[in-house]
Image: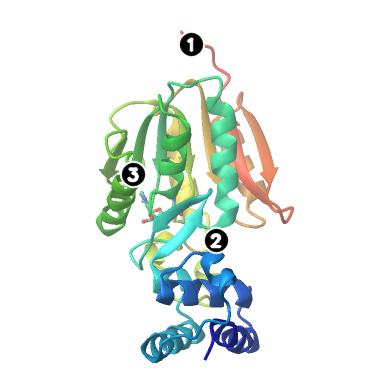
Amino acid sequence: MTRRQALNRAREMLAEANIEDAPLESELLLRHILQISQVELYQDPEREIKPAQEEKFWSLVKRRLSGEPTAYITGHREFYGLDFYVDPRVLIPRPESELLVEKTLALAQTHPAAAIAEIGTGSGAIAISLALNLPQANIYATDISEAALKVACFNCQQHDVADRIYLLQGDMLEPLPEAVDIMVANLPYVSQAELSRLSDFEPQLARNGGADGLAQIEKLCQQVSGKLRPQGFLLLEIGQGQEKAVTALLRSLFPSAEIELFPDLSGIARVVLLSLTTPPP
Ligand SMILES: C[S@@+](CC[C@H](N)C(=O)[O-])C[C@H]1O[C@@H](n2cnc3c(N)ncnc32)[C@H](O)[C@@H]1O
């Protein structure tokens, strides 16, 4: 069977199973087996695949059809133009979280040596994307999951930022050694009811936001005061429809702060930005 034939067949199978983006996913699986780039794949589509490779490829397609995410099968996920190692110890970074990185980088333009904390770092994708774009920043990345931090540590080494990101294990803001200028968090925000309808390949700890999905975000907001410097910024990723509740909570906790919402590419309010306006003493 040629590369083209294998790709076409896999695309059909994934599309029949209603897997979104079947063409891209089949390509990622085939490239993973052949260990080739996209350019190499399309330069020589009529090349025959060796029988052993073909057998492995169909076993991966079968795993994908059973619901396992492609990123866990290949061990890779692209985020903010960078390659990250992922496995079931961490959430697979989502494209919509790139908005959190973009907004943080825009704020950091005026604070290049800012102290930044990412709470709930998972694979480390957000903290590492920030570190690579802000060489002077001092970055803390925390997670309650020791297993997730092992993945983040590996990714920090892969991207050569292990000496610039301080990985800290603990609950919410408890492990932070100092107040920071910018705090960023993509905490679990899926409600328990919604969670029971989703595939269970990703860690519950990374997705479970309690009965209404807001438990972890609320917990963080309650702890922010004292861990965010005067004129500091808090950026939160939120789930669809959570903007009113989160804005109301922040308004009650920080009556004089500015609050802004930013939509993702689908028009869903995805990032909440809280700007503390208190001037330094
Ligand atoms: C939605 S995932 C986000 C992972 C990563 N930041 C990303 O955007 O791909 C949430 C992360 O928060 C962590 N987490 C959950 N509860 C936490 C808590 N109480 N304190 C710190 N981290 C927590 C989870 O282990 C998980 O890694």
Colouring convention used in this rendered image of the protein: rainbow
Q: Which quadrant of the view contains residue 261?
A: top right
Q: Residue at x 47, y 57 (%)?
A: 188
7 to the left or right of 73 = right
**Residue type, mark 3 in image:** Thr
Q: Which residue is under mark 3?
A: 142
Image vertical order of residue 146 relative to residue 253, above or below: below
Q: Which residue is under mark 2?
A: 212
Of mark 3 and mark 1, the one earlier in the sequence is 3
Of mark 2 and mark 1, the one earlier in the sequence is 2
Q: Are marks 3 and 1 in contact (CB under 8 Å)?
A: no
Ligand 1 has an atom within 8 Å of the beta carbon of the residue at disc 1: no
Dot 3 lies on which element?
Answer: strand
Q: Which residue is under mark 1?
A: 280
- Residue, far top: 281
Q: Is residue 201 visible?
A: no
Ligand 1 has an atom within 8 Å of the beta carbon of the residue at disc 3: yes
Q: Which quadrant of the view contains residue 177?
A: top left
Image vertical order of residue 272 relative to residue 134, above or below: below
Q: Residue at x 61, y 77 (%)?
A: 22
Give me the C-alpha separation between circle 3 and circle 1: 26 Å
Dot 2 lies on which element?
Answer: loop
